[in-house]
Amino acid sequence: MDKDIQKNKVVSLNIPILTDGAHGVDVSQTSSRVSSLDRWIARKLLDLLNHPPLALVLWNGEEISSSTPDARVHIRDSEVLHQLLMNPALHFGDLYSVGRIDIDGDLVEFLETAYRATASLPKYHKLMAAQTWLFNRTRPNRITDSRDNIHHHYDIGNDFYELWLDSEALQYTCAYFPSADLTLEQAQRAKMDHVCRKLRLKPGDRVVEAGSGWGGFARHMAKHYGVRVTSYNISHQQIVYAREKAKAEGLDGKVVYVEDDYRLIAGKYDVFVSIGMLEHVGRDHYRDLGDVIHRCLAPDGRGLIHSIGRNKPEPINAWIEKRIFPGGYPPTLREMMDVFEEHEFSVLDIENLRLHYAKTLEHWLARFNQHAEKIEQMYDSAFMRAWRLYLAGSTAGFSAGTLQLFQVVFTRGTNNDIPWSRAHLYETD
């Protein structure tokens, strides 16, 4: 692994290990005594969650719960309670990452229980809104910021992602499981073909891709559908990897990877496609993206945007935004329409693959856990626990319905060359 990349990632997590920066309390010196204030805070936390079937196990072994618990949360010191009350959205992840919080039982099930408990609680959402405004504002996605945001998440070493993504195309986006027993590799191929059928790709089409990842989808389109692909990405590590793969597969003249921002896409194309990039755009820039598509898409062109989303507007989890996925924002369908409305693009098809993403994440998390010891050696324990929490939390989010996965197919409003039915989506050779 590139040592500079490894060092950058560990520093960028910036998780407090022994002291709380706000209070400067040395955890190693914390008394085992549990005070009446500690017990009050523990009960208050359960009250904020509407008394879910969870127990808080304090550092002296005392257990506090308001119902028969399905899971137990071990609190290692009194300062943990104060931090959770002050800013749970941010501090829970930090505290779990460094072992000051531990979970008895299945981590995904615990998180799903917590998400379901808070989904319809007005007082919890009011508290989260206030804390977001005070402490957890998201990073901007201006063109000067986006490169740093992408570098933080993707340029941490390709060998890290190779441990748990599919081995064929290295797809870091939702797979498609027309049959539940598919392998991850088979489901990712099925996803790529599903998108290609939606776009009705044909030999000779000029395709532009906004956000290439490690280039697997661009290569798949060129190899299996005879199209020419220009793919934009600002992750340097991903671009280097993608170019090497395309050269090795003899696709040099059919796929071009451009290391640049989507806002600088140039040329005219028959097809626009973006898989898992809209989450990085930021809702203030959806019209900018619409301008780009309008500028580059041919009169009878068609497009598809595949994105994590929400059923109602809500920022990304503060800890994920700060430690894992800076600048991220999952939009609602209504918010996504800002991409299309200004230039009167016509939406032809919308599909929600939420449960397919939950299943994809189950595969990723299982592979991640198989390599947890190696990942800890590559980085450190806090990094490994942080990413385990991120993958588990994402799995729970899709299972509990707090996250969605939208695929939106569109064309220009004046284009009548559109399918009469969805039959083409399910026709296979």
Image (spheres, rainbow, N blue to C red):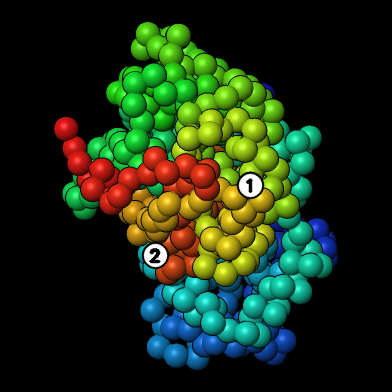
- Viewer-nearest residue: 374 or 396: 396
Residue 283 placement: quadrant: bottom right
| Residue placed most toward the observer, 91 or 170 | 170
Q: Secondary structure at mark 1?
A: loop
Which one is in front in this view, the residue at disc 1 or the one at disc 2? Answer: 1
Camera-nearest residue between 19 and 360: 360
Q: Is residue 156 above or below residue 252?
A: below
> Which circle marks residue 399 in the picture?
2
Seen in the picture, residue 126 relative to 84 is either above or below; the reply is: below
Q: Does residue 56 appear anywhere in the picture?
A: no
N-term-proximal mark, 1 vs 2: 1
Q: Callout 2 environment at 10 Å: few (<14), some (14 to 19), or many (20+)?
A: many
Q: Where in the figure is residue 21, as x and y percent of width and height?
A: 80, 58
Residue marked by disc 1: 343
Can residue 340 be seen by looking at this rendering? yes
Q: Where in the figure is residue 57, as x and y percent of width and height?
A: 52, 77
Residue drawn at x 51%, y 51% is 346
